[in-house]
Amino acid sequence: MLAVEQWAEIRRMALVEGLSQREIRRRTGAGRDTIRKAVASAEPPGYSPRPSRASKLDPFRAEIESRIADDPRISAVRLREICTELGYSGGKSIFDELVSELRPRYLRPRTFQRTNYLPGELCQFDLTEPRAEIPVGWGQTRRGYIVTAKLPYSRAFAGALIFSKRWADIASGMRRCLGRLGALPQKLVWDREGAIHRGGGLATVEFAAFCGSLGVGWIILDPGDCQAKGALERDHRFVHGNFEAARLFANPLDFQDQLDRWSDKINSRVHRSTRARVDERLAIERSSMRPLPEPMPRTEARLTLRVPPQPFRFDRNDYSLDPRLVGRRVEVRAGQRAIVAVSLDSGEVIASHHRCFAGGQTFTDPAHQAALDQLRGERKRPRQPTVEIRPLARYDELIPA
């Protein structure tokens, strides 16, 4: 049979270039009849459906359909046994195909219904990525993520901007979302995010410690079980299409401020599913939830090191430490707003910097620079030679008159 590409090429030569049948035959090697049919046909070549032939199953079709109508879950093996007793001698494959075609007509399809949630029972968490990168200053933008949270009973929503999927950042987003919702649910629901799930349906040590500090349980969903978090999954489309659309953001703080105000707005509307105001149902839900603990669990990234002679690097930026403490052990606490260094032997704060999410920057505390200049000056100042000064009488004794 003539290939579609060759059919199209023959028609192009004839209808566009105006070539003769002889020239087309010379170029393509196709026969005269093939060229004539290709030019005359506006439809690409293809196999026409073959006429159906009688099947060995035709005499038993009514019996099979009757048995399935009586019991839609009857197995194909049992149906073939019955038909074999009645004289069927065909194969297994064609028999199973017919059963698969007939069974859905009598078997009720699987359907889903809305889940009923108790007040304060669950809080669903997830991550979604903004469509555009977030301006972070110094002419740079950075890929961000939004930790989203929703109480399924009231449909109250909260979100927090973060810039990585590391545990410290996700925990900071969860802490902020719970603070916005204003109370603790019985369980936190997550899918198998890397910082949450360590395999086999088990929580990571950090996530379990966070939930233990709050006194809440957790649910880690099975792979592909998107229905279990459907109340929140639908909000992600709403975030992209309603919140992000036609909005400009100056920096991460502006993004978070606009997100908070947008969340307050949608939490004061009448939800189409519950037919009630979200904030009114949230007030009811909070009455059955435990209050947030004071203080909330700390979520900063913490690491211990000895003060190096050069600035300390974190998240692509350099931050100064007190040069007078070089070699001493300190704990660096990196949060979403600040990076703080605390001396382990005295407990004093030796550095405090504003957290920067841009890259390639160096931040030096003026006090650290002054201390460094002082140390450099002491090293450069020349030492005066020590000269012994003796009384003149000593020289009189040594030198005779």
Image (tube, rainbow, N blue to C red):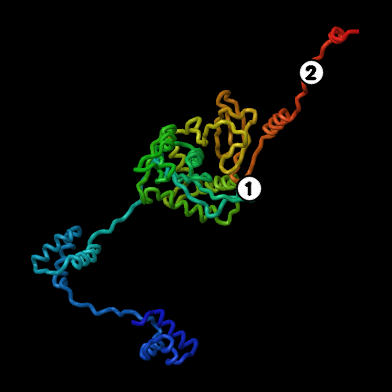
Label 1: which secondary element = strand
Residue occupying the point 33% across, 53% down: 112
Q: Quadrant of residue 61?
A: bottom left
Residue 55 horizontal/vertical position (percent): 17, 74
Q: Nearer the viewer, residue 45 or 284?
A: 45
Where residue 289 appears, x then y in whole percent? Answer: 42, 36
Image-quadrant location for residue 106: bottom left
Number of numbered markers: 2
Amino acid marked by disc 1: Gly
Q: Name the one closer to the observer, 66 or 52.
A: 52
Left or right, 55 with respect to 335, comes to: left
In the rendered image, which residue does mark 2 sit on? Answer: 387
- 363 in relation to 95, above or below: above
Secondary structure, mark 2, is: loop
Label 2 amino acid? Val
How far is disc 1 from disc 2 in space, using C-alphas?
Answer: 59 Å
User: Between 293 and 223, which is closer to the camera in this rendering?
Assistant: 223
Circles 1, 2 touching at the beta carbon (< 8 Å)? no
- Name the residue located 37 percent from the left edge and 45 percent from the top edge: 221
Residue 288 in view: no
Residue 319 visible (yes or no): yes
